[in-house]
Image (spheres, rainbow, N blue to C red):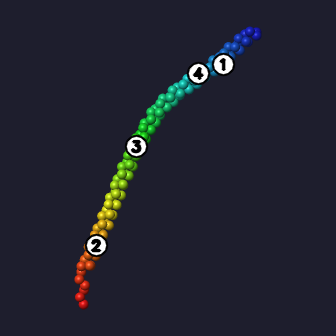
């Protein structure tokens, strides 16, 4: 009777192990599918990241060109203001000289 009992225990044990192996296989297959999808998503994220980094570099270059252009225009405006200030000072000096010249050449008032 021991031999049939050992055979029965071995049969049920192998059935239980087959069930466990099937469960592990299903879990492994599901994990492989999820890993494949994650790999695909990672590839798309990488492509998008490259696109974002490229756009960022282009925008930084455009921003730098804009800032340099703005600074150049501000320098020209400042130079123009200095030139206008010098012209106003020269005009003021000329007018003062004309006014002083007229005051010198004016005859004294009669009494």
Calculate the distance from the C-alpha at mark 2 to the C-alpha at mark 1: 118 Å
Q: Which residue is mark 2?
A: 97
Q: Which percent across, then down, holds residue 20?
A: 63, 21
Query: Which residue is found at the position 72% from the left and 10% from the top?
Result: 4
Viewer-proximal residue among 93 and 60: 93
Q: Can you give x and y, in whole percent of width and height, for residue 7 in the image?
A: 71, 11
Label 2 to label 3: alpha-carbon separation: 54 Å
Q: State which tag comes first along the sequence, 3 or 1.
A: 1
Horizontal arrangement in the rendering, residue 59 relative to residue 93 (left or right): right
Tell me which numbered mark, 4 or 3, is placed earlier along the sequence: 4
Question: Which marked residue is nearer to the observer: mark 4 or mark 1?
Answer: 4
Label 2 with label 1: CB-CB less than 8 Å:
no
The correct choice, above or below, for 25 with respect to 46 in the image is: above
* Pointer 3 local density, CA inside 10 Å: few below 14, some 14–19, many at least 20: few
Does dot 2 land on a helix, a strand or a loop? helix
| Quadrant in the rendering for residue 1 | top right
Label 3 sits on residue: 61
- Quarter of the image where the C terminus is located: bottom left
Q: Return the residue at label 4.
A: 25
Q: CA distance from mark 3 to mark 1?
A: 66 Å
Q: Which of the two marks, 4 or 3, is nearer to us in this view? A: 3
> Taking 104 as reference, is 28 above or below it?
above
Judging by the rendered image, the residue that carries numbered circle 1 is 16
Q: Can I make out residue 41 in this image? A: no
Residue 14: x percent and y percent? 66, 15
Q: Is residue 106 visible?
A: yes
Classify mark 1: residues with Cα within 10 Å, few (<14), some (14-19) or many (20+): few
């Amino acid at each position: 009777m021991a031999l049939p009992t050992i055979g029965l225990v071995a049969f049920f044990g192998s059935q239980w192990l087959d069930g466990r192996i099937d469960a592990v296989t299903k879990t492994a297959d599901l994990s492989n599918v999820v890993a494949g999808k994650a790999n695909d998503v990672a590839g798309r994220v990488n492509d998008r990241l490259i696109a974002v980094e490229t756009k960022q570099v282009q925008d930084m270059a455009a921003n730098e060109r804009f800032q340099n252009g703005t600074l150049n225009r501000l320098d020209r405006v400042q130079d123009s203001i200095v030139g206008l200030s010098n012209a106003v000072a020269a005009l003021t000096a000329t007018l003062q000289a004309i006014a002083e010249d007229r005051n010198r050449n004016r005859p004294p008032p009669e009494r």
